[in-house]
Amino acid sequence: MFEASKIGSRFPPFTVTVERGKLRELALAIGDPNPIYQDRDAAQAAGYPDVPLPPTTATMFLFWGNPQFVEQLISLGLDVTRLLHREESYEYLAPIWPGDVLSGMMTVRDGSTRTGPDGTTIDLVTLHIRYTNQHNQPVLIATTRLMSRQ
């Protein structure tokens, strides 16, 4: 069961390198054939300095860069075997390019446990991840909402 005392907790920062090949793989996996995600020359011809991120790439940063993520969720009292991803939102503050090294700082923004009429419970948690690049410039704020049924 989610521990409400964990609201406001921060976890140690993690880093992730934005890899060109991973961006290409993601574009292929989601079925986006746009050549700007496949090839630097195509991206530059379209006016980008390099391959841009597919819009939902930031979801992967947490998984690529934070090997402690599952343990961190468990430390919040969540049952990760019953975890569902509810929602994700992003606020891009500056461009992110292949080769950038991002540092993510995850904070527990909100959380609660709700009890249904049948006595079952569900934990709802909101995580806030603030990313800066290798120049310590804020580039992205990601909000992740999770739920875990008990």
Image (cartoon, grey):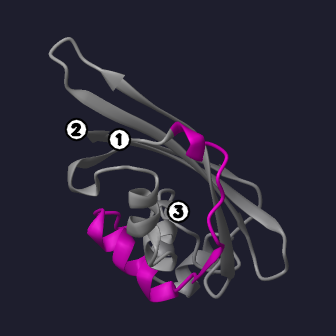
Query: Does 63 appear above or below 6?
Result: below
Q: Nearer the viewer, residue 14 or 89?
A: 14
Name the quadrant of the C terminus. Answer: top left
Q: Amino acid at mark 1?
A: Met
Q: Which residue corresponds to mark 3?
A: 58
Q: Are marks 2 and 3 in contact (CB under 8 Å)?
A: no
Comparing labels 1 and 3, the label whose residue is closer to the camera = 1
Type of amino acid at the residue the image marks with label 3: Ala
Identify the residue position indicated by label 1 in the image.
1
Q: Quadrant of residue 12?
A: bottom right
* Amino acid at the residue labelled 2: Gln
Name the residue rendered at 57%, 86% in the picture: 41
115 horizontally vs 19: left or right: left
Q: Quadrant of the N terminus?
A: top left
Distance from Cα at disc 1 to Cα at disc 3: 28 Å
Question: Which class describes the residues within 10 Å of circle 3: few (<14), some (14-19), or many (20+)?
Answer: many
State which tag comes first along the sequence, 2 or 3: 3
Name the residue located 36 percent from the left edge and 23 percent from the top edge: 114
Q: Is residue 29 magenta?
A: yes
Q: Nearer the viewer, mark 2 or mark 3?
A: 2
Residue at horizontal 67 percent and vertical 77 percent from the top: 102
Residue position for label 2: 150
Inspect this view and state whether residue 55 appears.
yes
Secondary element under disc 2, as helix, strand or loop, is: loop
Residue range of the region highlighted in magenta in the rendering: 4-33
Residue positioned 28% across, 51% down in the render: 79
